[in-house]
Structure formats: C-alpha cells, structure tokens
Image (cartoon, rainbow, N blue to C red):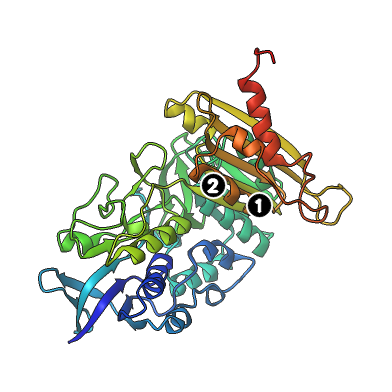
Amino acid sequence: MKNYDVVVIGGSAAGVTAAVTVRRQCPEKTILLIRKEKHVPIPCGIPYVFGTVGDPQKNLIPVDNMLQNSKVDSIVGEVLDIQREAKVIDTAEGEKIGYDKLIIATGSIPLIPPLPGADKGNVFAIKKDVAYLQGILDKLGEAKDLCIVGCGFIGVEIAEECRKKRQDINISIVEMQRHCLQLVYDVEFCELAEKVLKEQNINLMLDEKVKSLEGKDKVESIKLESGQEIKANMVIMGIGAFANIELAKKIGLEIGPMKGIQVNRYMQTSDKNIFACGDCAEKISFFDGKPSGLKLASIATMEARIAGANLFSIRRVNMGVIGVYSTALQNNAFASAGLTESQALEKGYNIIAGTAEAINRHLGSMPGGANLKVKLVFEAGSRIILGGQVSGALSGGELINTISAFINQRMTADDIATFQTGTHPALTASPIAYQLVNAAENAVQQMISGHTC
C-alpha cells in the first residue's frame, strides 16, 4: 500500500485546483489525485462543443500537464470506499491508498426530471463525459426538431451553438419561468437576451412546463402542461445538477440541507481530516448565511483554493457564495453578480438601483466601440452594494468581476462613485461616462432626492 500526505478525489475544476493549491501551500507534502475520467471536459466550455469548438476533444482540461508541472501524482480509477479510521482508500482496481488528509471533489450529476418518457432514445443530459458528448454531437447531425428543456445558461448557450452548426434545424426552448435567464437577471436584461435568441430563429416557449415526452422507442414530441404539443426528435435537458455525494454518504459524512457534503467555512467536513469543495459541497449565501444551491466553476475553484490551503493549518475562510454569471449571445455580453433587484426585494432589503449606459470607448468611432449597460443594486440605508448586471459590449464579461470585487468588499455607492479608474480611448468608456461610476452616482442621486445642500 502506498501512502500520501494528501489525496484528492475528483479531476475536474475543483479537484485539480485543490491539488495545485496544496502543492503551492505545502511544497514538502506528497500529493495524489484520483479521477474516474482519463479526459476531463472544461465544464463551462461544453455548450461550445456543439458549434464553435465542434469537437469534445478540443474542450479538455489539461489535467496531466497541470499535475505534472505541480509534481502531483495522478491515477485514473474509481474510489469505492474509504476507511476513515484507518485512513485508507479502496479503489475499484483493487488498490489501497493511505492518506493523512483527504479532499473530496466529486462534482455534480446533471438533473433529469422524472417525467414520463424521459428514458426514451435521443433524450440527453449534459454530462461531463467526452464519449457521451460526442454521442450528442453525432445525433445533432441527424435531428430535425431539437427541444431544449431549461432556458438558463446551459439552455441558451446550447441553443445558440446548435444554431451555428445547423441553420436548417428547428430549435425550441421550454422554460417554466416567465423569462429566460430569470433566476440571474432582472426583467429588462432577460428581455434583451430573449430578443437576441429570437433573432436567431430560436423558438422560446416561456411560462410552460413539460408534461411528458412522447414517442415509441425514441422521442418524437413533447407535451406541455398547457396542452400544446411540439415536435422533438431530439431533447437536451439543461435544468441544472445535483451534488454527487454517494461516496460521502457511504462513509457517513454529514450531508447539508441542500443535499451537499456539509462543510464549515474552512471547507472541512464532519471528519476533521476530510475536506470537500466544488459542486459536491454545501454552500451558504454571502448575503445572509443561509443555504445556497449555487453551482458554478468559479465557486468550485474558489472553494478548492480554500480547502487546499487549510489542510494542515487554517489560512483561508469562505465568506459565502456571491454568484457571478456571464454569457455571450450574438456578441452581446450578459453578466450578473450578487443579488438582482427582484432577489434583493425578496430577501427583504430596502433598495435603490442605479443604471448607466454608454459606448465602451471614448469615441464611438473608435474600433471595438459598442454600447455597454450597467445596473447596480444598493441597500438604501447603508448604501452598500448588493449586486450588479451588465449587458452589451463583450468587455462586460470582465467588468462583472470588478462588480463582484465591490460586493466582496462591501463597498458603498460613494466608494464606487469615487474609486480611481484607468481609462483609455481604445480600451474603455470615457472617465466622464464610465458606466460603473455613473450607475453608482445615479443611485446616490436617488438616495438624496428631496434633500438640499
């Protein structure tokens, strides 16, 4: 039996990041990563396999290179059991591996709702499996009527990428919410995204629920709760995922209210020698400390950097998940961080929102100039930022990270209105029209309305 100081189970974004972090923090430790898949897809890149990238083999995390560069040992195998008292891992290949500290990063499993007919042929989920994704891509070449269930990020990105690949295919998205992307954007941003999708001849079936999938051996149509029936000889489920906790449950680790592995703010499980991170781990909200169901690669890698640093002494603390999202539809960025206006109201905040819109260059005639809209949401009393949304120019994809930093540091509207920016005619909006500053100023103006100087 071989023994390691640290063993990481899972080879996707969280597992690889955790292993690399351990090496950076503890250069003297021996580290092993165990993963089930030889080839690991980049999670956020999966929708682009169906269009822009065109091949699952071109969307892979370079796991072996990353681990070799960090001097982390790696094996491809499946963990069957963990003897917690003895600190021994049993694999399906018959190996026994000893550990001092263990990190579980087993990720998540795509959700397939228990609908009648969901087990028919040509019904797919989005699995992080290269061969499975290649199978979807192959079937896409034969499909005439594609229906995507779920109009969140996975749904809209897959729809757009499939349209790039096939102009002749009928594409519909069925969504139970009134708007697409409604869980992360306020209505005005959702409507902009819907407009972009409709311009690509993507049929949006909003405020609709799937009742059943019809057909013989293979799906042929979808019945909706409203009574409508739409043709669909291929269906892709894009309605989220649930934590992969089977191993954790088997070895008796505590499970949290959102059905993830319960962890503290140091990413430590109910076993002091076992940590967990990524989609398999329980989350709490940055805003109120309540359980959160957010699952994002950015959250997974953040948690991995906390878990990897804390194995042998506490160095980092998880303050909770903010939730930072971004996508690009037809060269239009849509990005969000923290709470939307509607989410903040639901949580009981008294809020003020400020909006600013301008070209992302000093001169509209400069190359790359495009309109960029920013909306910032503040708690009215303290003036602390709660969230922000961006749409328009692709530069918004990076701007949302600045907004996330504002939220993380609990900056006020006045802080943002007076923070020092770097601007250039070829790179950013004018300092006079800078969207972040002016959205904050717009909110401040509303807060002081009625007062005199």
Measured in 3D between alpha carbons, the distance from the residue under mark 1 to the one under mark 2, in whole angstroms, is 21 Å
What is the crowding at mark 1: few (fewer than 14 residues within 10 Å), some, or many (at least 20)? some
Q: Tell me what residue is drawn at x 47 percent, y 35 percent.
A: 227
For numbered disc 2, what is the local secondary structure? helix
Residues 64 and 140: in front is 64
Q: Which mark is residue 329?
A: 1
Inspect this view and state whether residue 193 appears.
no
Quadrant that contains the N terminus: bottom left
Q: Tell me what residue is drawn at x 63 percent, y 53 percent.
A: 397
Which mark is in front, 1 or 2? 2
> Looking at the picture, which amino acid does disc 2 mark?
Ser
Q: Which mark is residue 404?
A: 2
Q: Tell me what residue is drawn at x 44 percent, y 82 percent.
A: 64
Q: Tell me what residue is drawn at x 37 percent, y 46 percent.
A: 293
User: Seen from this angle, which residue lies furthest front?
Assistant: 453
Which image quadrant is residue 13 in?
bottom left
Which image quadrant is residue 126 in?
bottom left
User: Seen from this angle, which residue lies furthest right?
Assistant: 365
Q: Position of residue 34 (x, y in %)?
A: 31, 77
Q: Position of residue 401 (x, y in %)?
A: 58, 51
Q: Position of residue 395 (x, y in %)?
A: 69, 53
In this rendering, position of residue 96 left or right of residue 129: left
Residues 172 and 220: in front is 172
Which is more N-terminal, label 2 or label 1? 1
